[in-house]
Amino acid sequence: MRKITIAIDGYSSTGKSTLAKQLARALGYAYVDTGAMYRAVTLFAIRNGFIGNGTERLQALVQLLPKIRLKFVPNAELGFSEMYLNGENVEEEIRQMEVSNQVSRIAEIEQVRYKLVDMQKAMGKNKGIVMDGRDIGTTVFPDAELKIFMTASLQARATRRYKELLDKGENVVYDEVLENVQKRDHIDTHREFSPLKKAEDAIVFDNSDMGLKEQFERLESIARRYM
Ligand code: C5P
């Protein structure tokens, strides 16, 4: 069987990561969650006071980009990789609302995208990879053999995200989660550099009314047809 590149893009909280991770495991492929990379840069920006003080501070962040070291470190016990920022495991912190509320602003910055897209291209150079994000099929791997564009109704996505955060013990309000999902989609689809959009050759996968098992089975059978 040939090794292929699988690009999974789509709106916020469509469950891309869960599904992409499962698919990678079933195929024996590497998995890369590019959202975690944008989130880690955002956490760095928050911690170092680069957010909320106008565009000058964001320019200062750009100067510091070479000092931001990101690494996915496999956790054998959990069965997936965790994000490390300058040597520190930040997997939990990058999923919190504070980061979700700022990440799309950081992901708009051209130099941030250059840095992360370069890293992502390098990670996928040997194929045999499932990568999820917003611009994987359009910018990172325009030649990917299989491109999936995931979508679901706004309500379905906000409800999933809300439950996920509650399960993690975060103290959140549904309306706040809904607003965050909506706002991120707006910024992600309207930004100047590699906005979120369906690649022309991507397969649309609407999972509003599908359970996890059904989604996975469908996706795996699509993937195997391309291998
Ligand atoms: O996938 P996740 O929701 O964790 O991504 C967080 C944010 O990172 C997105 O809302 C988007 O602003 C940004 N992102 C991006 N390009 C990617 C992956 C994520 O702009 N390839």
Image (spheres, rainbow, N blue to C red):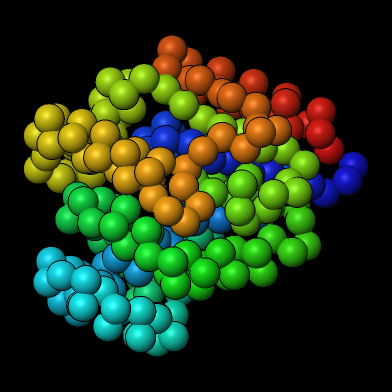
Residue drawn 74% across the image and 64% down it: 125
Residue drawn 16% across the image and 44% down it: 169
Estimate the x, y position of residue 23 in percent, counting from the top left: 63, 38
Query: Can residue 99 be seen?
Result: yes
Query: Can residue 25 be seen?
Result: no
Estimate the x, y position of residue 20 in percent, counting from the top left: 56, 41
Estimate the x, y position of residue 104 in percent, counting from the top left: 32, 53
Vertical comparison of 214 with 114: above or below: above
Residue found at the far front of this picture? 192
- Taking 99 as reference, is 129 left or right? right
- Taking 104 as reference, is 221 left or right? right
- Taking 199 as reference, is 59 left or right? left
Residue found at the far right of this picture? 1
When asked about the image quadrant of residue 120, the answer is: bottom right
When asked about the image quadrant of residue 214, the answer is: top right
Q: Quadrant of the N terminus?
A: top right
When asked about the image quadrant of residue 147, the answer is: top right
Q: How many marks?
A: 0
Q: Quadrant of the C terminus?
A: top right
Q: Of residues 166 and 96, which is closer to you in this image?
A: 96
- Taking 191 as reference, is 49 left or right? left
Residue drawn 38% across the image and 44% down it: 190
Estimate the x, y position of residue 213 in percent, counting from the top left: 53, 22
Residue found at the far top of this picture? 209
Vertical comparison of 198 with 187: above or below: above
Residue drawn 14% across the image and 30% down it: 174
